Image: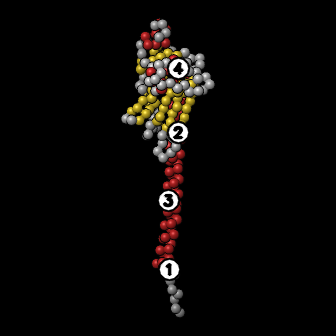
């Protein structure tokens, strides 16, 4: 009897299979890479949004309970604001500053504390009491491209107050009469739409002081 030929694959069949496997593998790899990019983009955006929201909460919390709120002199009002808060038997001056470091804009918080009893003894003026300055804190930490931030001032109807210190001499008075104070943040992300966030605080019952 003649033995049947052994079954096997021809070279052409092997090449076809390898080609098909390469095509399928390419589709799978492309899908995985795109999925990972989407996941990374979504994660970066979520982290950035959380960072911004947390920062706005910090600023908003102190400004809401502040009495008084300190306005910076001149055109610094857009980038510096102070809040005096009584907490845990201390008087705290929270100063929020928008400054640049190495060409990138950041939002900082500085806290100076005074003993409440000492402040009362010197007539209620914290600046006449002994100060304890806490380390400066950068509120928005996860920043690659920086932020665009500005403090805004509004009327009781929500209209933003506009004043150019270079051409107008009464900007301090205009902003001191504001009924609302806000902070506007724009966070830039590589290859994505910027994240824009804003919060406003009603300060109609807050008296104002000025800091230079």
Q: Residue at x 59, y 17 (%)?
A: 205
Q: Secondary structure at mark 2?
A: strand
Mark 2 and mark 3: Cα distance apart in space: 31 Å
> Is 197 situated above or below 69?
below
Q: Residue at x 48, y 79 (%)?
A: 10
Mark 2 surroundings: few (<14), some (14-19) or many (≥20) residues within 10 A: some
- C-alpha distance separating marks 3 and 4: 60 Å
The residue singled out by tag 4 in the image is: 174
Q: Which labelled disc corresponds to residue 8?
A: 1
Q: Are marks 3 and 1 in contact (CB under 8 Å)?
A: no
Name the residue rendered at 50%, 24% in the picture.
Answer: 163
Q: Which disc is residue 29 wearing? A: 3
Residue 94 visible in this rendered orientation of the protein: no
Spot occupied by residue 144 in the image (x, y as percentages of width and height):
43, 40
- Closer to us: mark 3 or mark 1? 3
* Residue 59, percent from left and from top: 52, 27
Say if residue 20 shows up in the picture: yes
Q: Nearer the viewer, mark 4 or mark 1?
A: 4
Foreground label between 3 and 4: 4
Q: Reading the chain from its start, which is encountered first: label 3 or label 4?
A: 3
Tell me the distance, in whole angstroms, between the alpha carbons under discs 3 and 1. 30 Å
Residue at 53 percent across and 37 percent down: it is 196
Question: CA gap, disc 2 to disc 1?
Answer: 61 Å
Q: Nearer the viewer, residue 168 or 181?
A: 168
* Marks 4 and 2 close (CB-CB < 8 Å): no
Residue 130, compared with residue 148, is above or below; it is above
């Amino acid at each position: 009897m003649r033995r049947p030929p052994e079954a096997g694959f021809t070279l052409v069949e092997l090449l076809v299979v390898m080609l098909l496997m390469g095509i399928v593998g390419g589709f799978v790899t492309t899908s995985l890479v795109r999925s990972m990019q989407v996941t990374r983009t979504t994660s970066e955006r979520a982290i950035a949004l959380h960072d911004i929201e947390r920062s706005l909460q910090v600023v908003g919390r102190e400004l809401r309970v502040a009495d008084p709120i300190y306005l910076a002199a001149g055109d610094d009002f857009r980038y510096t604001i102070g809040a005096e808060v009584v907490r845990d038997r201390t008087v705290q001056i929270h100063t929020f500053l928008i400054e640049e470091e190495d060409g990138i804009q950041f939002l900082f918080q500085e806290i100076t504390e005074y003993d409440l009893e000492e402040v009362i003894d010197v007539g209620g003026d914290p600046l006449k009491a002994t100060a304890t300055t806490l380390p400066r804190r950068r509120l928005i930490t996860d920043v690659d491209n920086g932020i665009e931030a500005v403090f805004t001032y509004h009327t009781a109807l929500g209209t933003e107050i506009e004043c150019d210190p270079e051409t107008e001499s009464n900007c301090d008075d205009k902003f001191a009469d504001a009924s609302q104070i806000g902070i506007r943040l724009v966070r830039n992300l590589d290859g994505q739409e910027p994240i824009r966030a804003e919060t406003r605080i009603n300060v109609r019952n807050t008296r104002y002081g000025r800091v230079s």
